[in-house]
Image (cartoon, rainbow, N blue to C red):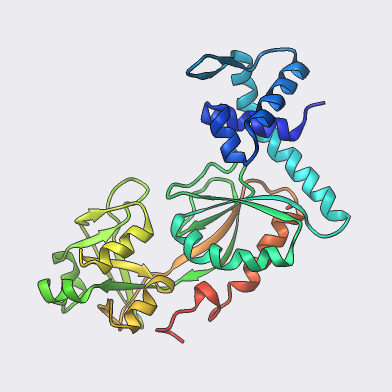
Amino acid sequence: MLDLNSLRMFERVASLKSFTAAARALGVPKSNVSRAIARLEDELGTRLFQRTTRDVVLTLTGQALLERSPDVIANLSETMDYVRGLAGKPRGLLKISAGVGFGVNVLAEQLPEFLLLYPDIEIALDLDSRSADLVADAVDVAVRMGPLPDSGMVAVKIGEIRRYLCAAPAYLERRGRPSSIEDIAQHDTIDMPGPNGRARPWTFSRGTETARVETRPRISVNEALTIHRLVANGAGLGLLSGYICAPQIAAGQLVDVFPDWSPSAVGVNLVFPSRRELSPVVRAFVDYMKEVSRPGNLWMKDTLTL
């Protein structure tokens, strides 16, 4: 009978093309990985890798198994976690995917309490500026920001992040403060590219008024924390999340350029790879995130609005 842990180790070796790297990623001795692959090859009666002194290459059989293993691992993990949960508190591995900024500033603050509540849950936190493939990467739940593509995934919205148009005092001294929303287009701006790689318009609201600015970023970067550092160091204007920039605005280290105007908020969603019944582990995490993601609490709190 195929062993779930052996399949996980096989998938990691195949992805990283290295037994040593797979062992390091899984936090186990290399000998454990080698034995698991040997057991899997004995069970299947075929070699899964061609090993040379420099490379680990999948055989045709190994490639076929790799193409199917994410679904097998996800289904078995989901079933085992669900059955374990029926017998008591949720237990097992929870793989979470999120952006670097949200992981550093939010999940790193919230997960310790979650682990205290659920001592039998282990977490694999995958932080990346690019969205993971939930099925191929066997992700249980992903945190996604902004509009969601029509991917067939299931999403639960847990809140919105308020943003501010910020600049460093040094930048405003050098370039002057824009006197109107339209003046933003004449300034150096820093932003993430849109899904098509092009610049995204910035939208603002004030009461019943709305404004839209077409920007041509002087710096385009795919990671929110880097935008924050660039703005703080005087590179230009940028839209920053309140939980990052509010303390610096209050301290005078950053300037809220248009306090009367509100940039469009960013929705935060938890996304799952299937419509089947959530495992107890995933359900526990979703319920916890919904509970702590209240206005005025943790990442939804900033000193400018409360």
Q: Quadrant of residue 264?
A: bottom left
x%, y% of residue 196?
34, 45
Q: Is residue 230 shown above or below 15? A: below
- Quarter-of-image position of residue 164: bottom left
- Near-viewer residue (17 or 277): 17
Can residue 136 be seen by looking at this rendering?
no
Residue at the bottom extreme, as displayed: 306
Q: How many marks?
A: 0
Where does residue 98 sit, x and y in percent of width and height? 51, 54
Report the residue at 52% width, 31% height from top.
16
Query: In the picture provided, is 288 more to the left or to the right than 59?
Result: right
Q: In which image quadrant can residue 86 be found?
A: bottom right
The residue depicted at 25 percent of the width and 60 percent of the height is 190
**Residue at 17% of width from left, 71% of height from top?**
171
Name the one closer to the observer, 142 or 152: 142
On screen, residue 27 above or below 247: above
Q: Residue at the right extreme?
A: 87
104 above or below 25? below
The residue at 59%/20% (across/down) is 63
Residue 261 picture location, percent across and down: 31, 79
Residue 19 is left or right of residue 149, and the answer is right
Query: Residue 238 location, x and y as percent?
Result: 28, 66
